Amino acid sequence: MNTNDILMRLAAVIESRKAANGGNPDTSYVARLLKKGPDAFLKKIGEEATETVMAAKDVSHGANAEHLVNEMADLWFHCMVALAHYDLSPADVINELARREGLGGLEEKALRKALQREAGED
């Protein structure tokens, strides 16, 4: 199973649900979320993030890890809806992760802050 292929296929389905591509909010959950706009799908991302955190805490206390996987899938899905709304794709996120590969977390954070400072000084 190629993870990248699965993400790209799901992204294509989400893209097909956009109004410009014929998505029907009466028959498609994604089309309905996109029609409602960012407030709707961003709220869902917040809800799913909270549910993911709670599921992880439950797993830490002996609950079935499958619940965490299910909540994480919901979170990723709604994040992909947000990406599509902003004309981005999972490939954009994967490319950013690839760019960061090999950088330590603290190093990457310091580099990001330095670039933000430079951008603010221009």
Image: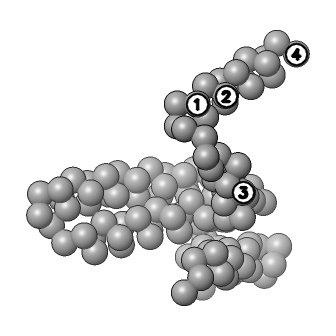
SS category of the residue bearing label 1: helix
Q: Secondary structure at mark 3?
A: helix
Q: Answer yes or no: is residue 104 visible.
A: yes
Helix, strand or loop under label 4: loop
Q: Residues within 10 Å of mark 2 (few under 14, many from 20)?
A: few
Name the residue beneath numbered marker 4: 122
Residue found at x 11% / y 64%: 62
Residue 92, image x, y percentages: 73, 58
* Residue drawn at (65%, 24%) of the image: 113
Mark closer to the chain start, 4 or 2:
2
The answer to which of 93 and 78 lies nearer the viewer is: 93
CA–CA distance in space, label 4 to label 3: 26 Å
Report, in whole angstroms, how far the alpha carbon at label 1 lies from the one at label 2: 6 Å
Circle 4: residue type: Asp
Answer with the quarter of the image where residue 71 lies.
bottom left
In the rendered image, the quadrant that contains the C terminus is top right
Circle 4 or circle 3, nearest the eye: 3
Residue beneath disc 1:
107
Residue 10 appears in the figure? no
Q: Earlier in the sequence, mark 4 or mark 1?
A: 1
* Image disc number at residue 111: 2
